Image (spheres, rainbow, N blue to C red):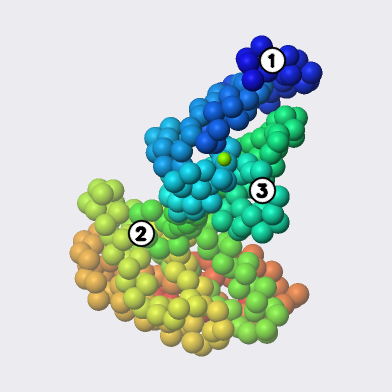
Amino acid sequence: MSYVRKIQLLSHFEKPILSKVLSDCPARILIVDDKPDNLELLSTVLTVQGYQTKTCERGKSAIELAKTDVPNLILLDISMPEMDGFSVCEILKKDFITKDIPIIFISALKDVRDKTLAFQIGGSDYITKPFQVDEVIARVKNQLNIHYLQAELRAKNKQLETEIKHRQAAENELLRLNRKLNKLATVDRLTGIANRHYLDEFLIKEWQRGKREKFSLALILCDIDYFKQYNDRFGHLEGDVCLQQVAQAIVKAVNRPADLVARYGGEEFAIVLPQTSAENAILVAEKIRLQIQDLRIPHPDSLVRDDVSLSLGVTAVIPGSKYTKKQLLITADKALYQAKKQGRNCAILSPMA
Ligand SMILES: [Mg+2]
């Protein structure tokens, strides 16, 4: 068939409508057939449709071509000398480089068994000779669309996997920063014990719990005796070291995990003791007082002793509607005032009014 005759034939077909993908980058099609006439016809039809075509008359060279210049689609004749289309297909489907290329078989055979085998060994479609040119175009378009959609799906899945990994990493980093931030928000930077903000939250929680479970909640407020004089003599840096030592000594004396030691203000500390009676709270306060004394931090300007000491105010109550959390703090503060008034370096218990 002459080229002119082919063009006359082709003029009957609709103008090629190319998908965006095809117009951006024309699909490459490898046509394999042992009949040069078939190759020429198919190549012309598909080239006019905007595809790039390569032709090949033998199975072995088709395999080589498919590996070196991977096409987007293969039209593969079944009946060929030396190596038939089925064998070519089997080899291509086993190769990592060529396994995903869609293959459309071409054959004059009308045997159902051949068609079944074609699909079993990995063929995507089947065209019978003689060609209906518009059928060839439709089937090629269809296979390419499926091929592109599959590739797009694979790419999107991969992108999604990467995005998920990045998001997980970002979430972990956020969690880590949040934990750090929470710690910073609840810890007193100088002494490393809980800060005033955390104390307030803790007291609210324990007050509610005490109310529910009807247990006694105890609070100790304490203050370093003559701390202003200590700072005046040794300077603020030494004063800070003293605060750190006192804080750690209090933590050591208060050893139940449910208890809380917090910095209340300058040289003042607060100790919250859930499920603790007034009698037991005063014992804890006394233990703290002795622990500070044992530190033997020299304080020549103290009017009580020649080393650092603590005054402590203690109170305890079963939280109920009769009292408020604020009253608990006021009462402990009053007790602390009494302790100072009574000569410091002592613990005073004051009941809730
Ligand atoms: Mg043939």
Ligand 1 near label 2 (Cβ, under 8 Å)?
no
337 over 351 or under it: above or below: above
Q: Rounded to the nearest whole Å, what is the CA distance between mark 3 and mark 1?
A: 27 Å
Residue 139 pos. (x, y %): 70, 37
Please give left or right for residue 91 compared with residue 104 in the image: left
Q: Residues within 10 Å of mark 2 (few under 14, many from 20)?
A: some
Ligand 1 near label 1 (Cβ, under 8 Å)?
no
Q: Residues within 10 Å of mark 3 (few under 14, many from 20)?
A: some
Which element carries disc 2, helix, strand or loop?
loop
Please give left or right for residue 247 compared with residue 331 in the image: left
Mark seen at residue 152: none
Counting the numbered discs, the total is: 3
- Residue placed at 51% from the left, 73% from the top? 272
Image quadrant in which you'd find residue 72: top right
Q: Please name the amino acid that badge 3 sits on.
A: Leu
Residue 282 pos. (x, y %): 47, 82
Image quadrant in which you'd find residue 135: top right
Camera-side residue of 134 and 203: 134
Q: Earlier in the sequence, mark 3 or mark 1?
A: 1
Please say whether residue 163 is visible from this viewpoint: no
Mark seen at residue 191: 2
**Residue of label 3:** 109
Camera-side residue of 338 and 285: 285
Q: Please name the amino acid that badge 1 sits on.
A: Arg
**Residue of label 1:** 5
Closer to us: mark 3 or mark 2?
A: 3
Please give left or right for residue 105 compared with residue 268 in the image: right
Residue 7 pos. (x, y %): 69, 14
Residue contact between numbered discs 2 and 1, judged by CB atoms under 8 Å = no
